[in-house]
Image (tube, rainbow, N blue to C red):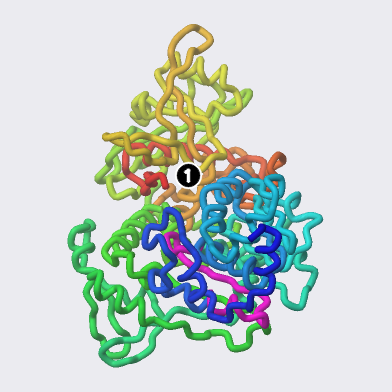
């Protein structure tokens, strides 16, 4: 049979009216799957209902909010070949970036399409120029695959839109992608993502992110457990996952080995065993929590503990570690856990930091002679160099991460700065100077006194290697060396401005270990604008557009002229992170 005749015959093949998942179990082969090479509907039972709804043309938009490792990409693997074969219409698949899209097309999607028997007649008739790394032009439709950017969305008219990891998509582009359907009666938008931010700041306005708005419009279906003992239906919730841990230090073994899940109705506790997790996962079902949803808009949410391959003990360990970090002011591990493991939306605190000062019960004079605070571990001196003066802070930390500010004021000469350092008995290795503004002069100071030069950066972290070669990220770089103007070697490092200041403002808001300041700290200031209490409130987080990539990211921006207290306190925090006194700055590289 000729290829032309074969294509003509396939066009008259009756439509397969089985469910999408049943169709896929016969025709879809998934390369590199961790759970099943041939599509197995029961390998990811939490995806069955979303797949079933994909076959219903009354559905306009599907939103899946699920954790990392949930197999969200399987939605694309199944729905795209099904749409091409059984319910055709042009398709736009948007990944995070153009390189991500090309890799996905070459390594995953094309092998799936080539192995799909119903598509064989269609693929065999197209010429080699019609199959590219970013598109396949079939006679009856087109498949486009590209990064989530405006260039890829423009001049496209499609029936289906698939958006991957929408929490990373620039604000405004989800709506831009929707518009590519041109309101067809049978159009479909499918959005899959982990949890993301609930709000975004545009200009001076705080509003919902596009992903959160899309979710709120749906019927918000939550995965619920069917208790094998009492048959009660209850939404999977982190508050029902239990573990044992004594007060004080984290007993990781006890947490991991004691993890279990409890039915909130009959109080039966289920052990963390693969067979039990599989049973509970396979019998779970979705419940609608928003009956007033926009017609045709459906959403599904499932947390990691509802998935059979996720050990509850590992999740419990992640939670207790995040809680421990939060107690020292580092909220980043908790944000990661909430968005990636629980697949929930993260609600940022109001951008203006809620800083609490006063009532510490000590004065500057109590420590002017270099006296130690109770249970002191280390003390640090941070210097913010200006053109004709310096700002200097000295803070002492305890092993539990709590600390006391001992000094903050302006010095007019480098000799006066050195006097503060020696009077408060801070060693040279724990004295740092900000080199971002005047690096040549700072290098000269560091060469003269043995200090370390600090550079604040906009990056989120720096790669370090553990023993054994495992890469990890920290909020500061390894210490490096450079040549000073007088030919001497000086030490320097870079630190994450955003991540360290996140910790700082959490500590200042009393969300973590005590971060005290003398009750009379403002008395040292010569002008009101130079007071510590004014300067420490001089930065807020705002959404900033990258001039090159046009991506929106949250960055700290100045709201007052003098922000030296913020910079100095952030630098003492970097030293506390290095010494392991504050936060959980180590994040395993993914």
Residue 206 visible? The answer is: no
Residue that sits furthest to the front in the current view: 1
With 227 as the anchor, is 116 left or right in this view?
A: right
Q: Is residue 290 above or below residue 368?
A: below
Task: Name the quadrant containing residue 60.
Answer: bottom right
Q: Quadrant of residue 35?
A: bottom left
Residue at left offset 62%, top offset 68%: 85
The answer to whether residue 331 is visible is: yes
Residue 159: image location, x then y, percent: 72, 68
Report the front residue among 165 and 258: 165
Q: Which residues are magenta?
A: 51-72
Is 71 in front, or is 199? 71
Q: Does 58 lie within the magenta span?
A: yes
Q: Residue furthest top?
A: 487
Identify which residue, 73 or 329, lies in the foreground.
Answer: 73
* Relative image position of residue 542 (x, y in whole percent): 64, 52
The percent position of residue 356, horizontal first and vertical second, equals 49, 58
Image quarter in which the N terminus is found = bottom right
Residue 419 lies, with reference to residue 66, above or below; the image says above
Q: Is residue 301 left or right of residue 90?
A: left
x, y percentage for residue 296?
66, 81
- Foreground of the two, 490 or 387: 490
Query: What count of labels does the image hold?
Result: 1
Q: Which residue is mark 1?
A: 500
Q: Residue at x 24, y 85 (%)?
A: 268
Vertical relation: 383 (above or below) 461 = above
Q: Is residue 486 above or below residue 302?
A: above
Which quadrant of the structure image shows residue 490? top left
Say which residue appears at 58% left-offset and 78% top-offset: 16
Asked if residue 316 is among those painted magenta in the image, a careful observer would answer no
Label 1 CA crowd tier, 10 Å (few <14, some 14–19, many 20+)? many
Helix, strand or loop under label 1: helix
């Amino acid at each position: 049979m000729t290829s032309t005749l074969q294509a003509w015959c396939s066009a008259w093949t009756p439509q397969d009216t089985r469910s999408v998942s049943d169709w896929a179990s016969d025709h879809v082969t998934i390369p590199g799957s961790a759970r099943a090479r041939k599509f197995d509907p029961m390998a990811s039972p939490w995806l069955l209902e979303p797949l079933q709804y994909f076959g219903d043309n009354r559905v306009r938009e599907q939103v899946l909010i699920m954790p990392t490792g949930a197999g969200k990409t399987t939605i694309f693997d199944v729905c795209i070949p099904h749409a091409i074969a059984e319910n055709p219409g042009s398709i736009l698949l948007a990944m995070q970036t153009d390189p991500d899209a090309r890799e996905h097309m070459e390594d995953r999607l094309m092998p799936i399409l080539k192995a799909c028997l119903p598509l064989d007649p269609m693929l065999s008739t197209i010429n080699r120029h019609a199959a590219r790394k970013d598109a396949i032009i079939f006679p009856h439709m087109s498949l486009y695959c590209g990064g989530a950017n405006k260039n890829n969305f423009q001049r496209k008219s499609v029936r289906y839109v698939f958006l991957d990891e929408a929490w990373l998509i620039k604000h405004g582009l989800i709506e831009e992608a929707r518009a590519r359907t041109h309101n067809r009666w049978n159009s479909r938008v499918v959005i899959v993502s982990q949890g993301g931010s609930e709000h975004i700041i545009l200009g001076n306005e705080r509003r919902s992110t596009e992903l959160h708005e899309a979710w709120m419009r749906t019927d918000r279906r939550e995965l619920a457990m069917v208790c094998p003992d009492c048959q009660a239906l209850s939404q999977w919730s982190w508050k029902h996952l239990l573990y044992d841990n004594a007060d004080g230090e984290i007993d990781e073994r006890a947490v991991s080995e004691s993890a279990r899940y409890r039915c909130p109705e009959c109080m039966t506790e289920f052990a963390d065993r693969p067979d039990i997790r599989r049973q509970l996962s396979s019998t779970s079902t979705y419940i609608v929590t928003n009956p007033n949803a926009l017609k045709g808009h459906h959403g599904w949410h499932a947390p990691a503990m509802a998935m059979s391959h996720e050990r509850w003990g590992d999740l419990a360990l992640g939670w207790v570690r995040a809680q421990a970090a939060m107690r020292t002011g580092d909220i980043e591990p908790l944000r990661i856990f909430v968005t990636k493991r629980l697949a929930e939306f993260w609600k940022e605190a109001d951008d203006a930091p809620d800083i609490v000062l006063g009532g510490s019960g000590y004065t500057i004079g109590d420590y002017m002679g270099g006296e130690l605070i109770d249970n002191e571990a280390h003390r640090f001196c941070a210097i913010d160099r200006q053109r004709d003066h310096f700002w200097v802070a000295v803070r002492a930390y305890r092993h539990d991460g709590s600390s006391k500010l001992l000094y903050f004021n302006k010095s007019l000469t480098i000799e006066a700065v050195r006097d503060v350092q020696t009077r408060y008995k801070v060693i040279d290795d724990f004295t740092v100077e900000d080199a971002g503004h005047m690096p040549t002069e700072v290098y000269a100071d560091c060469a003269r006194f043995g200090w370390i030069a600090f550079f604040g950066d906009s990056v989120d972290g720096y790669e370090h290697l553990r023993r054994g070669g495992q890469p990890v990220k920290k909020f500061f770089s390894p210490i490096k060396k450079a040549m000073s103007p007088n030919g001497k070697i000086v030490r320097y490092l870079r630190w994450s401005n955003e991540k360290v200041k996140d910790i700082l403002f959490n500590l200042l808001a009393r969300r973590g270990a005590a971060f005290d300041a003398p009750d009379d700290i403002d008395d040292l200031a010569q002008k009101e604008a130079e007071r510590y209490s004014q300067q420490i409130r001089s930065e807020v987080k705002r959404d900033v557009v990258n001039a090159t990539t046009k991506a929106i990211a949250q960055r700290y921006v100045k709201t007052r002229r003098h922000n030296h207290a913020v910079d100095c306190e952030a630098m003492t925090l970097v030293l506390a992170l290095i010494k392991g006194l504050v936060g959980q700055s180590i994040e395993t590289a993914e």
